[in-house]
Structure formats: structure tokens, C-alpha cells
Image: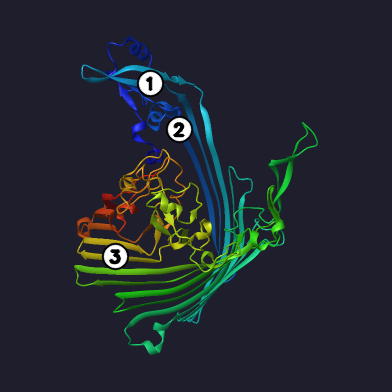
Amino acid sequence: MGAASSLRPNRVVGFIPMSYLDPLNPTTSDLMSTARLFDGSFIGAPSDPVESEYTNVIANGFAAGTSKYNSRHFEFSLGMNFDLNRVLKGLTFSTMFAVDYATAYSTNYTDTYAIYIPQWGNYNGKEVITSLVKQNNDEHSGIQGVGGSTYRQTIDFNAHFDYNRSFNDVHNVSAMLLANGYQQSQSGEYHKTSNVNAGLLASYNYAHRYYAEFGSALLHSAKLAEGNRKGFSYSFTAGWNIAHETFLEGSVFDDLKLSASYSLLSQDIDVESYGMYAPDFNNNHDVWWGWGVGDAQQATTSRRGSNKNLDYIKRKEFSVTLQGALLEKSLSFEASYFRTTTEGLIIVPNNLYPSYFSTYWPDASFVPYTNYNDDLRYGFEAGINYKKQLTDDWMVGAGASMTWYDTEASKRDDSQYADAYQYREGTELDAIWGYECMGIFKSDDEVAGAPEQKLGETPKAGDLRYKDQNGDGVIDNKDQVNLGRGGWYGNPLTVGVNFTLKYKGLSLFVLATGGFGGQAVKNNSYWWIHGDSKYSVVVRDRAIVDPNTHTVTNASSAAYPRLTTGSGSNNFVTSDYWLYDTDQFNLQKVQLTYDFPASLFEGSKVVKGISIFANGSNLLKIAKEKEILEMNVGSAPQNRFYQIGASVKF
């Protein structure tokens, strides 16, 4: 599928039937007497192939050999539970040990195959092959290759004491003391991934009206330096069941709860690898020194400095939630505000150190990894659901939810940017940075009078023109601006609705979702076409340049820059020219179910119930850019899914 997105179909011949051979040409008949045939056809090629076209993905699937993938998986787990009521009422102990082991490898036979380059002619009004040229040979090595060998082993252990007890029917106490650890080793990685921590969870509620909970964990990470490997995480939660208060007796609320929580999590997930705190020295293959011929030596250079204070990344989370129910609990709602900061993300802060800490040739640096960047995520989510049994036969349900979400790079090293409009601090984490496009150059004279665009190829008539943001007369990376939100961490606004209608044993369920506020860039091989790339339909409206006047003849209607056999580096960069909205509303699922009456199975010793259903998924998309959003390039196509089935209870 990846090859199909770039391979030009007119350069792949595939299989040519033997019937196209000129029957009066003994040379081609002799050549084909030893040819490998597939249902009466041989592997062809274009009449003027380049060497890279001596093979193609279609022929490879038939003649390039075979491959077999093998995988084995072993799992083992053992757990035990102990009742310790005799020691302390309400106390239990549980433990578990588990092993997960997986291996995989592939075996293959790699063959070479011959292709035949045809020359075509006309014989009595019929197109025939007048001659053939053979390239490569049909050879089967007979030697089995083994490759892609991988393994993964995970060992996990946990043990915990649990305590649950009520006093005087109003004081409810529970607690857990936990020890947990796992270790994972896998092929290609020298250092095993290990995690060991101890945790404590304690909660209390008074008459199920006032709630308090505290959780903590003591961590250990081998990714950090000795003396800095211990970490601590904690969380607090408080809740109030307002519906149990006397002042709400007789109110419209059947349930009303307010809760708030705060947590500080120390995590090493964003510490990408082991030993990042240590200095790194390496041989530099580009630099060597010697006193004479034959005694040259590679130089040893520093790649980074040491920082033994490299620490855990701190994630601070705060949320407030209100949830309730009314109308005899047929209507329920929930609303939450959340705010999360991630502090101390690791960077190489070159601009925070003197310039002599690094050199560009020889390439060397004493700048260490440092905890520096901070991220902020915050938002609001709400949901409402209605469910009502209208009569003995009819039930209706409906619900809606929404999430509004925003992000901010709250701390960044922006000293490398000369202009404030390029500062990353204060912008969205999923900001799309690129150039502001001012249209297409209509002539070479217009190119000459515009700021110089230093984006690779020298622009010509029909190329894209960009705005000089800082007015220095040059278009380069200093002119990139924030174009919009990519929605990589979630759409700014996400909504969902569901509906259920039930009559006796027949029920209908509908689910729809939507995402709004995000944008994306048309930057795959379907849109960015240059060199010998495969053309797509978008180039039909390209800018057409008159070779004599060097002007665009369709300037008013051109919707795509000129075609080029070069790199297209001036046009094919991120800019708002390629930007599009990803706003969409999707009919995700519709299901119709029928439950046969329970009376049909009374007295049955085998079948206790039967349901039949029919459903469909991804049924409809409503979007301005629907065609783009439903397009996959270089991967499996998107699909709609339909299913009919039955569920039988025994």
C-alpha cells in the first residue's frame, strides 16, 4: 500500500500474456522456452525501463520468494488471598506473581526473477511483441534465511494489605498498603526496563456524606543518577454528598455530589533513556589527527555534559467535579474543570549556556540534559443523560457530552528567536508553525521584485509566495508564524450524543461524535508532487507557465503551484496554503437489537436466552473537508463496518 501511493502505474507492466508474442519470430519463442510463466503470462517491463524498474511490487509478490512469520507466547500467573480477620478485623492480604514471555522470528526464501523488456509492433492491424530483451535470471537459492528475531519477557510481582471497616455505622475507613514491581527485557535494548514502588491509599467517609482520601507512592528509577533515584507522589481528594444534607430534603435533587482533587506525580516516562544524566564521549569519524602518513587517529569528542541533578518530571493535577441526579434519577448530569501542569520536561538548553560550551566543527558539546520545559493543559467537560421507562413496553434514553480543551507551552527557552511572534512560550502545544502564503507568483518579474525566498530552489513564476514577517527582505525560517492548532492532543472541542429507544424486546441505539477547532496540513505524497512522483488529481488545476513570457496563463484560476521535476522545496513547506480544517461530525454507530421473550426459554435446561442484532459503524461523516478526512495515503483505506449476529445464553 505504501508503494501504491508513489509508484506510477504507467511504469509497471506486470504480466504479459504469451499470446502477444509475434508467432513468426523464432528468437522470442526460443527465449520464452525457459521463461517462468504465471497462468500463461510472463513478467514484463516498460519498453524503456531504468534499472530500478527491473523489479516491482506486483512481481515481487509472485516471484521474489516466500516469507513466514512465527510467534510464540507464554503466560503464567499465580495469586493468593489471605483472610487476616483473626489478626485484625477487616484485614486481608493478597499477592500475585506473573511471567509473560513472547518470541517471534521469520523464515524466508529469497528468489531472483527474470523480466522481459518488450518492443512492440503492428502485425496485420494487431499489436504484437516483435522482440524481447531478458534482464536477470530465475534463480531459487534453496537456502532458508532466518531474521527478525525478537523476544520480550516481563516479570511482575505485587502484594498488598487491605483494610475495610465501619465504626458505629457512620465512620467508614479503608486503606491499602501496596508493594509492586515489574521488570521487562527485550531484544535490542541493553538495559532492562524496571519499575519498583510502594504505595499507601487511605480513605474515610462520615455517613457517606463527607469524604476524604489520601494516596502516596514511593518510587525508584534507574534512569536517574545515584542519590536522585527516589521519588515521591501523592494525591488528596475531598468530597461532599450534598444530597444527604437536611437542607436539601424535599428538593428536586435525588443526588448531588461535589468533589475536588489535587495530585503531584513524579514520573520518569518522559525521561527517554538511561544514562541521560551522564556525560557522553564518542569517536568522531569526521575528525582525525596524525603526525604522518599511515598513523591517523580518530578524535574523541564530547557529545554532552554531565548533570547529576537531572530529576523526575513533576505532573500536578487539579480537578473539581459536580454530579447529580433529579426527576427520580431519570435525569443525571456531571460537570468537571481540570488543570494539569507538567514541569521539568527535559531539553538540551544550548541557548542557556555560553557559546563556547559547543562547537559546530568538530561537532562537540558540553551542554547537558536539563529539566526545563513546562506544559499546561486545562479544560472543562460536561455531560447529561436522560433515561425513562415511559410504560411497561416503552423506554427512552438520550445523552450528550462535551469537552473543551486547551494547552499552553507555559515555559520555553525562546532566546534563539529574535522576534516575539516566534516565541513558543505562551502558544498551544499543538501549534502548527509555518509560512503565511500570499498566493502564487504570476511572473518571473514578480519574483524579482519580491523578497528573496531562501527555501531551497529559487522560485519562479507559478511558485508560492510568502510574507516577509520581519521585513528583512529575505524569506527564511525567521518568517514562520503560528498558523493554528493541530489537535494532536485532542480537538479543542469534542462532542458526543447518544439515543436509545426500546419497545418490548426491540431496541435502537445511535451514537454520534464530533470534533471541532483543529487543523491539519496537506503534506503527504498526494498533495506534494515533485520530481518523478506519481501525479494525483489535484494537479489538474496547477499554475500553467508560458515558456516564452514566463507568466502564469491561468493566474485567476490556478489552485496548485506549477509542476516541477526538481525538489519543490520552495512550495512544499508548511504554510497556510496547505492548511485545512478537521471539523467533523460522525455517525459512529447504529444498532438494532431484538431480545426474544424470556417466556420462550422457561423450563429450558440448555438455552436461557437469545438476542439478534444488526449494526453499522463509521456510517456517515459530515465535514467541509470530508474527502480529505476520509482519505488514507500509503496505508489501509478507511472503511464502514456492518455486522449481523446473534447472542445465545446457556
Within 10 angstroms of label 3, few (less than 14), some, or many (20 or more) residues?
A: some
Q: On the rendered structure, is 1 left or right of 193?
A: left
Within 10 angstroms of label 2, few (less than 14), some, or many (20 or more) residues?
A: few
Residue 143 percent across, percent down from the top left: 51, 23
Q: Mark 2 points at which residue?
A: 68
The secondary structure type at the circle numbered 3 is strand
| Residue type at the position of mark 3 | Asn
The secondary structure type at the circle numbered 1 is strand
* Extreme-right residue of the structure: 291
Q: Residue at x 69, y 54 (%)?
A: 358
Above or below residue 360? Residue 260 is below
Is 449 or 323 nearer to us in this picture? 449
| Residue type at the position of mark 2 | Lys
Q: Residue at x 53, y 50 (%)?
A: 77
Q: On the rendered structure, is 254 left or right of 310?
A: left
> How far apart are the alpha carbons under marks 2 and 1?
29 Å
Badge number at residue 498: 3
**Disc 1 vs disc 3: which is toward the camera?**
1
Q: Mark 1 points at which residue?
A: 116
The secondary structure type at the circle numbered 2 is strand
